[in-house]
Image: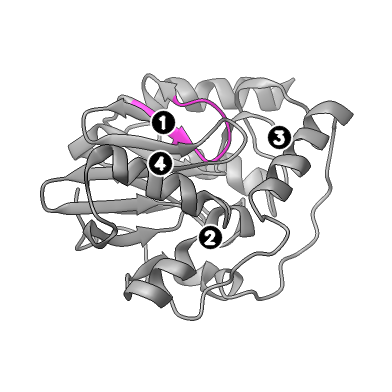
Amino acid sequence: MRLAPNLHRLGNDIVAAYLIVTPEGITVIDAGLPGHWNDLLAELAELGRPLADVKGVVLTHGDSDHIGFAERLRRELGIPVYVHTDDADRARGGDKPKTPMGPLRLGPMLGFFLYSLRKNGLRPQYLGEVVSVTDGETLPLPGAPRVISLPGHSPGSIAVHVPAVAAVFVGDALTTRHVLTGRSGAQPAPFTDEPERALASLDRLADLDAEWVLPGHGAPWRGSPADAVAEVRRAAAV
């Protein structure tokens, strides 16, 4: 799905991944679920670009609904997968703390489960190797993505700021569709390790220059990161 010139989305409002498309190559931001592999191939075919044009994958964190097809790209094509050093073990299948589910509604929760089932989400493909990154790095990938640490949802959660496409990719630092309640609008994401720390980390987004705030779950936010952060804080206060 084309969002803007050089900016595409895979998946839907339940689980999403993104492509930064440049003449020099393609950067994948998050990799959704394993079954999004076919979505990736279909999107590349529509763009008229071969799989070999993918130069790297940047993970906003190491949860199973974000690592998706990343290991397949790494294993079959040697494409590097970048993840913050504090989430490298999680992306390789290490232990993850159990977090309270919080509020839920049966319909949306069942929809999330069934979509995950359809996209092979119950059989995650953990990473065999990763390239560890840290806060402030600009990665040697198309679009020159810059890493911004946002600990809270997980220890190594990051945002990925790409001025070339006027976008910041936020993973689960916030959501615009709560997968357990179906509630729309910018708000805190469920399954967060440290909710208060996650909210505090959003300060790092507020001053970014971007026209798109792109979460791993929910509709793309068209507007400033500052406005998105303000709405998350309002939702958290309710």
Q: Is residue 125 above or below residue 67?
A: below
- Name the residue tied to disc 1: 213
Of badges 4 and 3, the one in the foreground is 3
3D distance between C-alphas at marks 3 and 2: 17 Å
3D distance between C-alphas at marks 2 and 1: 20 Å
State the image coordinates of residue 210 (x, y, percent, origin top left): 29, 29
Of badges 2 and 1, the one in the foreground is 2
In the image, residue 214 lies in the stretch drawn in magenta: yes
Q: Residue at x 74, y 20 (%)?
A: 238
- Is residue 119 rendered to the left or right of residue 2? right
In the image, residue 141 lies in the stretch drawn in magenta: no
Q: Residue at x 18, y 38 (%)?
A: 164
Q: Farthest residue in the right direction? A: 106
3D distance between C-alphas at marks 1 and 3: 18 Å
State the mark number for residue 169: 4
Q: Is residue 73 above or below residue 174?
A: below
Say whether residue 131 is visible: no
Tell me the element at label 3. loop
Q: Farthest residue in the left direction? A: 23
Tell me the element at label 2. helix
- Name the residue tied to disc 2: 67
User: Which numbered disc, 4 or 2, marks the residue that appears first in the sequence?
Assistant: 2
| Residue bounds of the magenta highlight | 212-220
User: Which numbered disc, 2 or 1, marks the residue that appears first in the sequence?
Assistant: 2
User: Which numbered disc, 4 or 3, marks the residue that appears first in the sequence?
Assistant: 4
Q: Amino acid at mark 2?
A: Ile
User: Which numbered disc, 1 or 4, marks the residue that appears first in the sequence?
Assistant: 4
Q: Amino acid at mark 3?
A: Val
- Name the residue tied to disc 3: 179
